[in-house]
Image (spheres, rainbow, N blue to C red):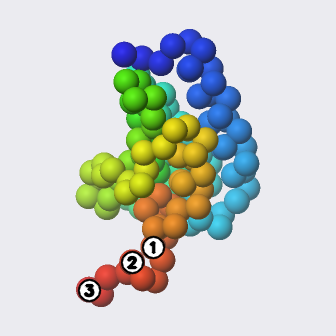
Amino acid sequence: MALSESEYQSVRVELTRFLQSRLGRSDKGGDGELLYQITGQSVCLFALRQNAQGEPGEKAPLAVAKINFLRPSGVWKLFWMNDALRWHAYEGGTVKSLGKALEIIEADERGRFWRKRPPSHRQAH
């Protein structure tokens, strides 16, 4: 079931506020422009990044996070995408508000969303 009209409008306001707070910031891996898409009860955040396989200056959307509203329990569940383009539930990412989910994404303590892994998360190759 999709978000109600009032829920949809509230989500849009919250997301717009979040994106505006990040304008001009490149401290999280050079996100550049951020976009969002609302589908049903899911919100997906994207960063426009340099397309590695495209022409110089060509940008492509890269998924940053997905946040699903679970209506029966009234909570939001947060997901991150790995390098193989698969979604994974974010540990501790079931929260009571969209705002709290956005705070977790912003803080990115585990380096899942902005593709900058803290030193303790790097793996030797």
Classify 10 Å Cα crowding around label 3: few (below 14), some (14-19), many (20 and above): few
Q: Earlier in the sequence, mark 1 or mark 3?
A: 1
Classify 10 Å Cα crowding around label 1: few (below 14), some (14-19), many (20 and above): some
Is residue 44 shown left or right of residue 97?
Answer: left
Q: Residue 58 location, x and y as percent?
A: 51, 52
The residue drawn where x is 59% and y is 61% is 107
Image quarter of the N terminus? top left
What kind of element bears circle 1?
loop
What kind of element bears circle 2?
helix
Dot 2 and dot 1 residues touching (CB under 8 Å): yes
Vertical order, 44 against 6 (above or below): below
Picture quarter containing residue 31? bottom right
In the picture of the structure, the residue carrying the numbered disc 2 is 121
- Marks 1 and 3: which is nearer the front? 1
The residue drawn where x is 48% and y is 77% is 118
Dot 3 and dot 2 residues touching (CB under 8 Å): no
What kind of element bears circle 3?
loop
From this viewpoint, which residue is outermost toward the front?
73
The residue drawn where x is 41% and y is 35% is 68
Q: Residue 21 location, x and y as percent?
A: 73, 48
The residue drawn where x is 60% and y is 51% is 103
Give the number of the disc on residue 125.
3
In the picture of the structure, the residue carrying the numbered disc 1 is 117
- Residue 26 in sight in this render: yes
Vertical order, 42 against 116 (above or below): above
Q: Residue 37 location, x and y as percent?
A: 49, 32
CA–CA distance in space, label 2 to label 1: 6 Å
Is residue 111 shown left or right of residue 27?
Answer: left
Is residue 1 shown left or right of residue 12?
Answer: left
Q: Residue 51 location, x and y as percent?
A: 45, 56
